Image (spheres, rainbow, N blue to C red):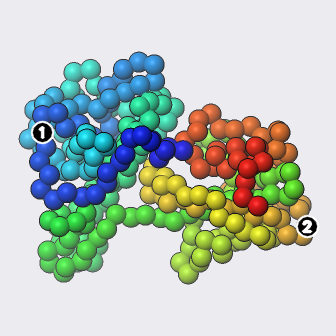
Amino acid sequence: MIQDIAPHVLRNQYIPGKEITDTSRVFCFKDRDFLTRDLGEACFELPERREFASEGPYTYLFTVDSQDYFLLVSDGEVPAGCEFINIRALRQRFLAPRELVFASYTAWQLFRWYRDNTFCGTCGSRTGLSETERAIICPECGRIIYPRIIPAVIVGVTRGDEIVLTRYANRPIHYNALVAGFTEIGETFEDTVRREVKEELGLNVKNIRYYKSQPWAIVDDLLAGFYCDVDGDPTIHLDDGELASGTWTKREDIELQPDDFSLTNEMMLMFKLGREPR
């Protein structure tokens, strides 16, 4: 999955007062776009601090191995050889280095959090950064704002050697997926599994078992993967507002997604190989 970058390590601990150096790498965002340098063969890199005339401010994000990464909000400057690309094009255009792909999504999540909390949602005052932790603080009312993480589930609904594969409705995604949905207030993950499967497929389920989790920073998600068995009538009654299709599919007929970034793809692969938790 996208976060599987070993032997590389993302060190996301916030370090107050971390100073930028000439060789620190910079994520420079402009709305949904960020600066990259295309190295060919689906590889890319980020510009270094010394390539920018801007004095910042530069905000420390995290470290990958021993390489520090900082955030700069674009003022229009484009270092030589770089270009702005849409963050959603990253998955289609660049596949390596893998640790930088993962770092890019994580940086995008942090950029949006900083941008969207410039002002306090309680009193409207301009906010500032905490000096002790990764948090945004309102100096007027004292509100503390932490990065937003949204829990959601990915669900493999099974019946013996078959699993339900889906296709999203009204989205530019043309490959197989599984049932998915956000956890509502007052719900457990298991409750979310039952509700989402019932809403999207019209099926009841049992034997819900946890598989694995994944951060999916492009939409602030923390995904929890579950398998479950259909309980009773296996006839699918599709919610066509959410899904274009939902089909019982045998293990050997499963077509995987075009890359191995997603929890959804890994769960389909595990079922195809007969290695899902029982």
Front one among 110 and 206: 206
Q: Residue at x 79, y 53 (%)?
A: 164
Front one among 27 and 139: 27
Label placed on residue 244? none
- For residue 56, which quarter of the picture? top left
Residue 182 placement, left or right of 205: left
The secondary structure type at the circle numbered 1 is: loop
Mark 1 neighbour class, 10 Å CA radius: few under 14, some 14 to 19, many 20 or more:
few
Q: Earlier in the sequence, mark 1 or mark 2?
A: 1
Label placed on residue 233? 2
Q: Amino acid at mark 1?
A: Thr
Which residue is the site of mark 1?
A: 21
Q: Position of residue 174 (x, y in %)?
A: 66, 38
Q: Residue at x 80, y 64 (%)?
A: 229
Do we see residue 129 in this rendering?
A: yes
Separation (CA) of disc 1 from disc 2: 62 Å
The secondary structure type at the circle numbered 2 is: loop
223 over 50 or under it: above or below: below
